[in-house]
Image (spheres, helix red, strand yellow):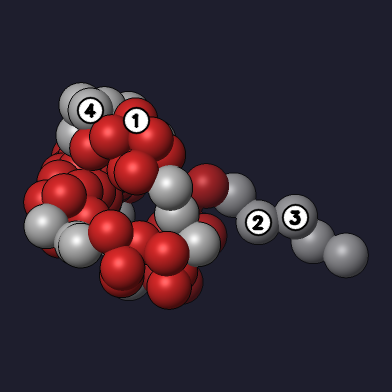
Amino acid sequence: MKQLTYEEINSSTGRSSGTDAIEVPFENMLATLRRWRQRSAQRRRLAGLSICLLDDIGITNEERLEEIGKPFWRA
């Protein structure tokens, strides 16, 4: 079985080796920014829930306070 070179792999995916060095880190950065934005929005929604709704979803007020107190970059 023939082993493919790096250039052959990149040509089969439609990417050139020069753009991979830029595209992959940029895609990772965008994914991280999206994840941070989602966490921030989820924590804002969690902060606005009533005690009755918290009971319905099985979260205590202490758990809520702990979660909404986290910075957006922390899971």
**Left or right position of 32 against 33:** right
Mark 3 and mark 2: Cα distance apart in space: 4 Å
Mark 4 and mark 2: Cα distance apart in space: 50 Å
**Left or right position of 4 against 23:** right
Spot occupied by residue 47 in the image (x, y as percentages of width and height): 16, 50
Q: For mark 1, what is the residue? A: 66
Query: Which residue is the extreme one toward the right?
Result: 1
Q: In front: 7, or 65?
A: 65
In the structure shown, which secondary structural element does the residue marked by tag 2 occupy? loop
Mark 1 and mark 4: Cα distance apart in space: 5 Å
Q: Nearer the viewer, mark 3 or mark 4?
A: 4
Disc 1 residue type?
Glu
Q: In front: 1, or 40?
A: 40
Question: Earlier along the polypeptide chain: callout 4 or callout 2?
Answer: 2
Label 3–label 4 contact, CB within 8 A? no
- At 26% from the left edge and 27% from the top edge, which residue is drawn? 70
Mark 3 and mark 4: Cα distance apart in space: 51 Å
Per the rendering, the mark at residue 3 is 3
Disc 4 residue type?
Gly
Quadrant into which the N terminus falls? bottom right
Question: Earlier along the polypeptide chain: callout 2 or callout 1?
Answer: 2
Question: Earlier along the polypeptide chain: callout 3 or callout 4?
Answer: 3
